[in-house]
Image: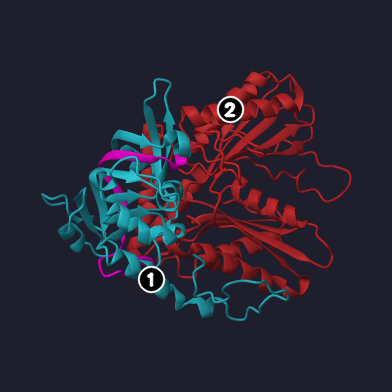
Amino acid sequence: MIKEQAIFEAGMEIMRRAAIDIPEDYRSGIKAMAEVEANELSRFVLLSMIENWEAAEEDRRAMCADTGLPRYFVKIGNEAGIEGGPVALERALRQATADATHEIPLRPNRVHPLTRQDNNNNVGLNAPEIEYSFEPDADWVEVTTVHKGGLFGSDYRMLFPGDGIGGIKRFFLDVMYEFGRRGLACQPAIVGIGLGGSKDISMTLGKQAACLRVVGDRNPDPEIAALEEEFKEVGNNIGMGPMGFVGSSMVVDCHIEAGYTHTGGMPMSVHTFCLSSRRATARIMADGAVEYCSDPKWFTPYMRREGIEWTGTATDTAATG
Amino acid sequence: MDGNGDGHGGDGLRRKRLQMPVGPEDLKGLQLGDVVYLDGVLYTGREGLYKRLLVDKMAPPVDLASVSNVNFHCSPAATVRDDGSYEMGAVTATASFRFSAYLEDWFKLSGCKMIIGKGGMSEADYKTHFVPNRAVYLTTVGYGTGALLGRGIKRIHDAHWLDDLGIAQAMWVLEVENFGPFLVESDLEGNSLFERQNREINKGVEKAYEGLRPPALKRYGETTSRDDEVV
């Protein structure tokens, strides 16, 4: 049985790692972009951010003062047991959020939408969000936290089948221009695109594609993978770079997730995970051991299944190391 | 860098180091795209502070001009320790375009000569409000270099209205050293670096959309030109 205390401690640790340590995949992606960025202002921004991540690691202080909206993605092994059940798990993660906010410190960003009441701990009504997925033949629980900015860089649109790939590309460009100017999206970003599903799931898939897949990862569907490559190219060729300066550094990678949708529609969402792409994962074993990493491997073959029965055997695809 | 802390970084960008409160001569020497580092005292202030002072007409907690003539659109990642002292981790700016409506009254009340924030304001705002007040705007870099800016904070003098406004919106009075980097976004003539860059980028918009038909279902919206900004 996994103990509530183990979940709480892992929650504290991933909150700290996410806030301070930029994931290596993102860092190497930005370093590669800085090497080919020809515009001096854009290059200055990229080099400043690299220096900032180093300062954060040396000082053990948060890399960005905007905590965004700290939240969790929990993957539960089908055979996992949690002492106290899901209620204990959620209590542990809410407690970790409050304590980490005070101890790191993080900016208490969460307020009531109407009264603007701030509990000064990033906990409140429906906050932090906790999303769930499951994994067959596993007895662990994996918890990922993401701290993503919450104001700019995302958009949703109901497209229709007749709009075609051109329509998808056009809306992608709209979001790049809309939120790239002045760097509102804090690009270069990991751009996540949700295609299909119901309206809300289109948003969810795109958000998860941006936040839970690493730079360099490709969708296993070759047609979608080709679109990911194409959109990355397209985004980096609109003549815009970081802060909306002239440049070629806009999209460090593009991830697309699809879901079966209404026969008449093609809902689409676009999300941008920013220059402070903060994510960290802990796998909590049944015996209490914990492994940490920055690759959540959220979209497992089980997650992307299409049929009724799960017949796959390669189950240990979720995060390690 | 020379004896004044000014110089080039080897990348074509000019470096400037300024003492706060900033003087008229300091601002005259600034060009769009200069990299600036600051020393001295500044204070944070965003919608929470603006609303109290300018809408609710409350008296300032302290004479603003005697504190500094630099206002930072910022909310720090800070905490109040059990003994009542403050700890400040990362420091970054918030997007400034939202505060446009406060500018006229704000300059009158504060006597500010420099506003620092994220993403700048419009060239129209600069010409209407900044130029007559002989003020400039600096933008943070990235965004944002939270850890680098956090390092530059030497002392926290005060956190006014902390109980009423919360950590994010309180007026933090900060003593800083080699605080930056920032980029000069507007000069004394009211030119904007962002808008200048936009005009360059707009030359490629038409080509980017070549062959892409508008979607079947339109949306109500305030702009359909991709040359426009949404701020």
Q: Would residue B181 be counted in the magenta stretch?
A: yes
Q: Which one is in front, A277 or B82?
A: B82
Residue A238, compared with residue A196, is above or below; it is: below
Q: Which chain is red?
A: A
Q: Residue A101: x, y in percent?
A: 51, 31
Q: Residue at x 58, y 23 (%)?
A: A9
Query: Which numbered circle lies on residue A189?
Result: none
Q: Would residue A80 be counted in the magenta stretch?
A: no
Residue A280, compared with residue A193, is above or below; it is: above
**On the picture, is B40 further left or further right than A173?**
left
Q: In which quarter of the image is residue B211?
A: bottom right
According to the image, label 2 marks what residue?
A96
Q: For label 1, count other residues whose C-alpha is less than 10 Å away and answer few (under 14), some (14-19) or many (20+).
A: few
Mark 1, secondary structure of its residue: helix
According to the image, label 1 marks what residue?
B124
**On the picture, is B148 further left or further right than B101?**
left
Q: Residue at x 17, y 59 (%)?
A: B24
Residue A21 at least partly seen: no
Mark 2, secondary structure of its residue: helix
**On the picture, is B154 further left or further right than A177?**
left
Q: Residue A248: x, y in percent?
A: 44, 65
Q: Which one is in front, B105 or A163?
A: B105
Q: Which residue is drawn at 52% across and 79% down?
A: B207
Report the amino acid beneath label 1: Ala
Identify the magenta region: B168-195
Q: The cyan chain is which one?
A: B
